[in-house]
Image (cartoon, rainbow, N blue to C red):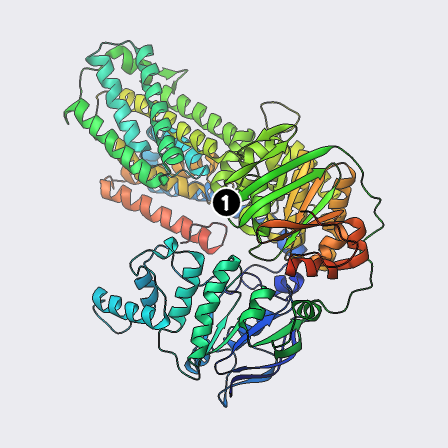
């Protein structure tokens, strides 16, 4: 029985100081100082320190293979698809839209692109336009299910995810689609001034995501919606629009990532999508401990991605290349990082 | 008749405030005992002490001669005290049967038998005398049926001659007709020997059903007597006390601006049957009423937070048959909800983000400049005199009064023409209150129209140009500044309790 919703006959000042769970009403300078110090440095960017530590360890452990430009290139390239998907997911999660469909959406997008370039002989530009439009449609469908029908975002995107998987399987007959035109692969997997194109795409997407979320009013409203939907609604925020924007961003990112995937792999792989689900979520939650603790944020997620990327790649180079080691590393890193953050109460992932 | 529950000298303080001051009363077998008092008089505190949720500072209680240990709901229950909390504690999605079984039959049984529970539930319902569909989900029952179900559940372990049934405001959300049905049930239970005590606001019905009433005022029991020969007027006198002579508030010049900012006509929704009001430029309009009078719904309906069942609102010369908060905001109507924690602030967000939420954006187009935003925030924090330099501090670290001022600053910065505030000073200390009032007065002098919904009569009297009193979902009285100054909160309290104008010099609206 809850008896704490206000005591009749007690003046409010007394009630406030009687509240135990919340910190006391008049907080002093000390709390501000401690909070400010926490925000400023070590905890906020601890991921960068750990990243530096990882690099140091691998540099000492396997200097010959690790300390090479090609290794750096490999890591960055390997993480670029994860990066694009993460930015999309950050936008969705910021608006409180829990999107489980982005990974399969990327997978289906890539086999769709494969189908268009092979069976329909479409040129690169048209394929790109159609696959990006497909991503937008996925986002709109997800947001309609949540906003119009009123489904919870987890259920809605679980459903669309399965439908997308079905489309994927129907397109490919569960086989690889080979024979992707050379023009397509070079257009998406080339280099530009020595920098792999996928890396450039990732950088652009990261900058766009950061701009949207931090430097535009809709971005702020998305965060408000994800943080306290009812309070935001009563303050005049159109919360369904925020959710639409979130799903649109993650759908778009899935479309772009699908194209990148096809370019990098070179064949339409019917099973490629879902393998991104866990790493992206891991990077995202790692990101909530960084830069802007407690919030899904783009730069924190980027740190998360490279932390995991360097760790996994380093272990592979050191001879621990089995898949289970990578997965174990991702899982443990996520648990340790968020565990610390939750203990420090800078994060509310505790349930 | 013998005393079942006897309270002697119960005193309970919260900090420096005495919620209960030497309260003595007794509850007798077979009697219905009403506990009355205006908001904040200590009624609920008293019941919660008896039920074991609060520990009094001093005083004694005994049940049929056995002393009741304080602070133990289990011990109180063992001695036969059955307490029904205001929110009834029912699970809406579960059926009547499941609700009746909740918390009892699962113990020590490896197998939960639906049939056994159904049988027990039917027996209990019959015994208590309630006719409801036992397999219907509780949310589909009427409010009265839910209350009666809570009564049945409180008595599920049988009820005997030494049992005391205590209800905390069971009538708050019921209409007069529904209240009578509930009271019939209580009557029949009392005839079977149960002592019943309940907190209520309904003077007329209480006089009808209760054998005895106790009246609390400012934590003291000012009367505990039989209802025989007691008139409603005498009861109101007891509740409100002697007329207060103080004059509240500043000498505000009367506002005579003709421009109408907001008009509601025949607005309906939930317990609010009909709301008509007109808000002028620079006016501070108060809304008063008991719980259940529709008062709680006024602000939510006016901003479209809840759907209307009828009526319309005129804003900026445009007529709206339906409204959502974002449309209201775009028409410069701001809402400051009562529930600060979950409806008003964004708890983990900084002061800056909370303050700029309604109008995000700075001078530069296409780029939200944090530096501009910080400067703007500092400026507005100064305006509402929140003394906090660190605009990046999460708002939840501020005191309630400061949080409220940040929310008010949010709407001042936005340029709201109409501000609707629900319980603006709930949970705010004295200093914080006057700072909030200062902000509101400033806003009204700048032409903003304010609607203050409040249960604090003194606040309404001292701050408002006009107060509307709601009773049973309708506006029954319109007190202007003159009437408020002449009568003080006493007149207002009277009107709130009985819904009818009594004092002279009061203008009533049909």
Is A313 left, or right, of B424 in this rendering?
A: left
Q: Quadrant of the N terminus of chain A?
A: bottom left
Q: Position of residue A247 (x, y in %)?
A: 40, 31
* Residue placed most toward the observer, B386 or A258: B386
* Residue placed most toward the observer, B501 or A104: B501
Q: Regarding mark 1 in the picture, which secondary structure is present there?
A: loop
Q: How many marks?
A: 1
Q: Quadrant of the C terminus of chain A?
A: bottom left
* Residue placed most toward the observer, A319 or B361: B361
Q: Position of residue A190 (x, y in %)?
A: 33, 16
Q: Position of residue A26 (x, y in %)?
A: 66, 58
Tag 1 subunit: A
Question: Which residue is labeled 1 in the image?
Answer: A293
Residue at 53% over, 34% down? B322
Q: Is residue B23 above or below residue B66?
A: above
Residue A26 visible, this angle: no
Is A203 left, or right, of B231 in this rendering?
A: left
Q: Residue furthest front?
A: B229
Q: Position of residue A18 (x, y in %)?
A: 60, 66
């Amino acid at each position: 029985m809850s008896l704490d919703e206000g005591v009749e006959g007690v003046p409010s000042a007394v009630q406030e100081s009687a509240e135990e769970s919340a910190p006391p009403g008049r907080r002093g300078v000390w709390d501000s100082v401690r909070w400010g110090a926490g925000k400023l440095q070590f905890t906020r960017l601890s991921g960068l320190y750990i990243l530096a530590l990882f690099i140091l360890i691998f540099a000492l452990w396997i200097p010959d293979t690790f300390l090479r430009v090609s290794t750096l290139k490999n890591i960055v390239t390997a993480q670029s698809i994860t990066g694009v998907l993460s930015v999309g997911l950050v936008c969705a999660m910021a608006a409180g839209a829990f999107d489980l469909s982005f990974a399969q959406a990327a997978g289906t997008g890539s086999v769709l692109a494969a189908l268009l370039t092979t069976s329909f002989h479409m040129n690169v530009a048209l394929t790109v336009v159609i696959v990006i439009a497909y991503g937008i449609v996925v986002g709109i469908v997800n947001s309609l299910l949540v906003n119009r029908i009123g489904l919870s975002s987890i259920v809605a995107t679980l459903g669309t995810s399965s439908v997308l998987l079905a489309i994927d399987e129907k397109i490919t007959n569960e086989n690889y689609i080979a024979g992707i035109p050379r023009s397509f692969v070079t257009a998406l997997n080339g280099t530009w001034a020595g920098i792999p194109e996928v890396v450039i795409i990732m950088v652009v997407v990261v900058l766009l995501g950061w701009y949207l979320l931090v430097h535009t009013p809709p971005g702020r409203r998305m965060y408000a919606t994800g943080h306290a939907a009812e309070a935001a609604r009563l303050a005049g925020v159109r919360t369904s629009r925020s959710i639409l924007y979130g799903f649109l961003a993650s759908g778009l990112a899935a479309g772009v990532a699908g194209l990148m995937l096809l370019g990098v792999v070179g064949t339409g792989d019917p099973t490629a999508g879902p393998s991104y689900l866990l790493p992206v979520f891991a990077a995202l939650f790692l990101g909530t401990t960084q830069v802007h603790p407690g919030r899904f944020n783009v730069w924190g997620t980027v740190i998360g991605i490279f932390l995991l990327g360097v760790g996994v790649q380093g272990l592979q180079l050191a001879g621990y290349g089995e898949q289970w080691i990578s997965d174990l590393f991702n899982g443990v890193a996520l648990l340790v990082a968020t565990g610390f953050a939750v203990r420090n109460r800078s994060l509310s992932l505790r349930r | 008749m013998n005393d079942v529950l006897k309270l002697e000298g119960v005193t309970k303080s919260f900090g420096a405030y005495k919620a209960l001051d030497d309260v003595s009363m007794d509850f007798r077998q077979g009697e219905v005992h009403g506990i009355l008092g205006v908001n904040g008089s200590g009624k609920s505190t008293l019941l919660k002490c008896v039920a074991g949720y609060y520990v009094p500072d001093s005083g004694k209680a005994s049940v049929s001669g056995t002393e009741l240990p304080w602070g133990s709901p289990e011990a109180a229950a063992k001695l036969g005290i059955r307490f029904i909390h205001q929110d009834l504690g029912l699970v809406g999605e579960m059926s009547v049967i499941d609700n009746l079984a909740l918390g009892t039959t699962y113990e020590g049984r490896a197998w939960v038998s639906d049939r056994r529970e159904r049988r027990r539930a039917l027996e209990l319902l019959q015994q208590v005398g309630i006719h409801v569909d036992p397999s219907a989900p509780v949310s589909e029952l009427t409010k009265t049926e839910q209350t009666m179900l809570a009564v049945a559940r409180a008595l599920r372990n049988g009820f005997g001659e030494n049992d005391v049934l205590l209800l905390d405001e069971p009538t708050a959300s019921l209409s007069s007709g529904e209240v009578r049905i509930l009271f019939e049930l209580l009557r029949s239970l009392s005839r079977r020997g149960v002592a019943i005590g309940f907190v209520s606001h309904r003077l007329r019905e209480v006089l009808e059903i209760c054998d005895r009433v106790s009246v609390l005022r400012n934590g003291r029991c000012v009367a505990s007597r039989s209802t025989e020969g007691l008139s409603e007027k005498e009861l109101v006198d007891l509740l409100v006390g002697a007329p207060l002579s103080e004059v509240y508030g500043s000498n505000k010049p009367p506002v005579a601006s003709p421009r109408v900012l907001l008009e509601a006509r025949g607005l309906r929704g939930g317990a609010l049957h009909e709301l008509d009001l007109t808000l002028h430029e620079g006016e501070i309009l108060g809304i008063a009423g008991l719980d259940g009078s529709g008062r709680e719904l006024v602000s939510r309906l006016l901003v479209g937070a809840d759907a209307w069942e009828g009526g319309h609102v005129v804003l900026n010369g445009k007529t709206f048959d339906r409204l959502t908060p974002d449309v209201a905001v775009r028409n410069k109507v701001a809402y400051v909800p009562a529930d600060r924690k979950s409806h008003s602030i964004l708890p983990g967000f900084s002061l800056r983000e909370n303050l700029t939420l309604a109008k995000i954006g700075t001078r530069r187009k296409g780029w939200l400049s944090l530096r501009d935003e910080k400067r703007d925030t500092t400026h507005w924090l100064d305006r509402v005199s929140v003394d906090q330099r660190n605009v990046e501090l999460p708002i939840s670290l501020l005191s309630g009064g400061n949080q409220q001022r940040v929310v008010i600053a949010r709407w001042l910065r936005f340029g709201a023409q109409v501000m609707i505030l629900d319980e603006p000073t709930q949970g705010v200390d004295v200093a914080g209150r006057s700072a909030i009032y200062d902000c509101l007065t400033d806003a009204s002098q700048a032409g903003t129209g304010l609607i203050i919904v409040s249960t604090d009569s003194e606040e309404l009297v001292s701050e408002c140009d006009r107060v509307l009193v709601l009773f049973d979902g309708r506006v029954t009285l319109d007190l202007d500044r003159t009437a408020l100054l002449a009568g003080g909160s006493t007149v207002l309290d009277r009107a709130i309790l009985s819904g009818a104008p009594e004092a002279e010099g009061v203008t009533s609206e049909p």
